Amino acid sequence: MTRTEASAKTLPARRKHVSRPTRVARSLGYVLLVTTALVWLAPLAWTALISLRPYEDTAVHGYVSVPTSFSSANFWAAWTQGSMGLHLLNSLVITVPGVVLVLLLASFAGYVIVRVPVRLNLAMLLMFTAANLLPPQVLIAPLFRVYLATPLPRWLSDSGTLYDSLFGVLLMNVAFQLGFCVFVLSNYMRTIPAEITEAAIVDGASLSRQYWFIVLPLVRPALGALGVLEFTWIYNDFFWGLVLMQTPDKRPVTAALKSLQGTYFTDNNMLAAGALMTAIPTLLVYVILRRQMVSGLTLGSTKG
């Protein structure tokens, strides 16, 4: 028997010996992932179960019990009593223009920081990044004074000021989300080869044409990923919609959920139904843009 034949006979045993720990580690990884997914989905499943149970059922048997009946009446009650349609429209009026505005401004700033040779580029990036470290609760008192003193035309605000207006909440969300988007887009734009814009400069393209026709199409994956994240964050904002709004009918849907809570009694089944209806737009946006989000988050993670 030659040395080659002997090594060929011992090769499967070695592979089997080496691959056994790999299979065990892979199995443990799958178990960990499934367990984590179940832990994260358990509150959502529990909320859906409560929303489908009549209040009388939970009042008699308790929330930790086997359901005896199911009903969709909680969803209709939350929609009518909480005026969910009106507040959902308010949230969309704040969220959709806010996402478009924050992505547009962040792409402008990121392009200037990366492509325009200015000495203050690093300082600008640090300023945008440092804004994310500032807790919003610190700014309540000065912002309240500024919003009351800043006039707006009546067609933009019924109150005549930034306070108690959808435009004021939109501006605040844009201001707080801008730093993160500038940081992400500027780092993403650094991965674009400089030779592309240099060739455009040789061809006589202006700075604006380089941005609109060269850089912006190349950062679409990052814009798609940030669009999903920003829609989720601005839409789910509860703090500014509650602090900067005085009129209940103008509040976004997340802040309007508070109206479903009574002073002495709260129907948790109806509140759970309202929370589920509130989450539907974010789920739809994720389903529609999931490919752009995944490609934007994973692009550049591998080489070659």
Image (cartoon, rainbow, N blue to C red):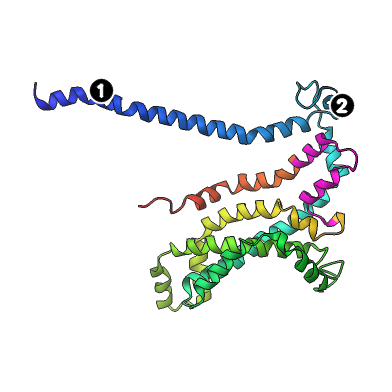
Q: Is residue 17 left or right of residue 147?
A: left
Front position in the image: 157 or 42: 42
Q: In the rendered image, which quarter is residue 45 located in?
A: top right
Is residue 266 placed above or below 94 in the rendered structure? above
Residue annotated with mark 1: 13
Q: In the rendered image, which quarter is residue 199 located in?
A: bottom left
Instruction: Point out residue 65 in the picture as x, y percentages from the top left corner.
Output: 76, 22
Instruction: Point out residue 125 in the picture as x, y percentages from the top left corner.
Output: 53, 68
The magenta stretch spans residue 259: yes
Instruction: Point out residue 192 in the picture as x, y percentages from the top left corner.
Output: 43, 63
Q: Secondary structure at mark 2?
A: helix
Give the dominant element type of the magenta stretch: helix, strand or loop. helix
Mark toward the start of the polypeptide (1 vs 2)? 1
Q: Which residues are magenta?
A: 250-275
Residue annotated with mark 2: 56
Question: What's under tag 1, amino acid-wise?
Answer: Ala
Q: Secondary structure at mark 1?
A: helix
The magenta stretch spans residue 156: no
The quarter of the picture where the N terminus appears is top left
Q: Is residue 70 left or right of residue 44?
A: right
